Image: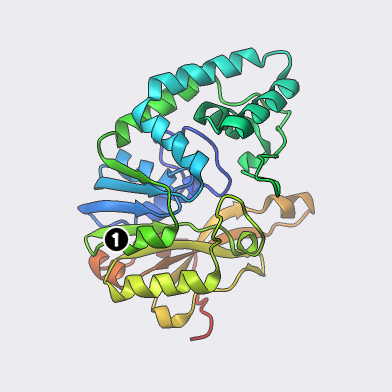
Amino acid sequence: MGAVRGVPQPFPYQGSKRQLATQIVACIPANTQRLVEPFAGSAAISLTVAHGGLADRFLLNDAHDPLMKLWRKIVDEPEDLAKQYEALWLAQCGKEREYYDWARERFNESHEPHFFLYLLARCVKAAVRYNRSGQFNNSPDNRRRGMRPATMRQNIMCASTLLHGRVRLTCEDYRETLANATPEDVVYMDPPYQGVCGRKDHRYCNGVTFEAFVHALNELNRSSVPFIVSYDGRTGKKAHGRPLPKRLRLECFEVHVGRSTQATLLGRADATVESLYLSPVLLARLGAVPDCLLQDEPQLTLFGDS
């Protein structure tokens, strides 16, 4: 289980579900007309679904404007973006740290997609972080110089080929995207971790509160829109965030991510798992729970109050 071979990944992104793509994509019913991602991020699931020919059309949304500008550049102007990234990558050689700082300043001034792509390729943990003034402030990972231009070009061009003419790109609050979803769609949601939502996050000016998110899922159920949610989970015995309430009638499974990096540093073998929730309408369309969710570990009974 894990990432699907041959699927392009134009940029790293903290929280990407690329390593869980096999299990998640197994929950996408055959002949899906449109896959909707209200929290697009790296779009790992949409790219995997497009690569496998499992959906006809796609909607990628994220409230983070620079991210959606980057996706629009990837889809509509891949050759230009690949050339701009190559120029930045070559210009950094021999002065990588100083050049990163310069590129970060240019991005904060302009929000140009090629600067954002370069920062994502080099910043620590591929994490998008902003200060209180809205300035990107993550530091570079000085152990690496970022994806090589030839590899980046291939990933950009392949992603563009998969999505061009088949995707709608939007930058709006996730609730607006969900309000326009239909029973013919499948919605995949990977919202920010609850630990992030409790703090000011300049990527999402309106926040993603637990209560509002639960209300939005209830509305999807009322409208018979099938959906999948990746939402927090646990490391060892430590739970991350509140489970979704049982009144939503969702089936919840543990999807194994692997051994926790922090646990490894502390000499422990704690495994990290994420909670994957499937809606009643989605399960009805599938006809059965995908085998890959049943073979690995027992089903997780992880529900909150009604």
Q: Residue 19 versus residue 13: which sits nearer the camera?
A: 13
Does residue 144 sit above or below 288 in this rendering? above
At horizontal 40% and vertical 49% (from top left) the residue drawn is 61
Give the image location of residue 255, x and y in percent.
50, 60
Circle 1 sits on which residue? 181
What's the colour scheme?
rainbow
At horizontal 45% and vertical 36% (from top left) the residue drawn is 69
Question: From where the camera sits, is residue 144 visible?
Answer: yes
Q: Residue 15 versus residue 168: which sits nearer the camera?
A: 168
Does residue 166 sit above or below 292 in this rendering? above
Left or right relative to 197: residue 300? left
Residue extending farthest to the bottom is: 306
Residue kind at label 1, given as amino acid type: Ala
Question: From where the camera sits, is residue 291 visible?
Answer: no
Left or right relative to 191: residue 109? right
Give the image location of residue 300, x and y in percent.
50, 72
Question: In the structure shown, which secondary structural element does the residue marked by tag 1 occupy?
Answer: loop
**Which corner quadrant of the image does residue 176 belong to?**
bottom left
At horizontal 69% and vertical 46% (from top left) the residue drawn is 133
Does residue 186 sit above or below 203 in this rendering? below
Circle 1 residues within 10 Å: few <14, some 14–19, many ≥20: many
Left or right relative to 57: residue 70? right
Give the image location of residue 218, x and y in percent.
38, 75
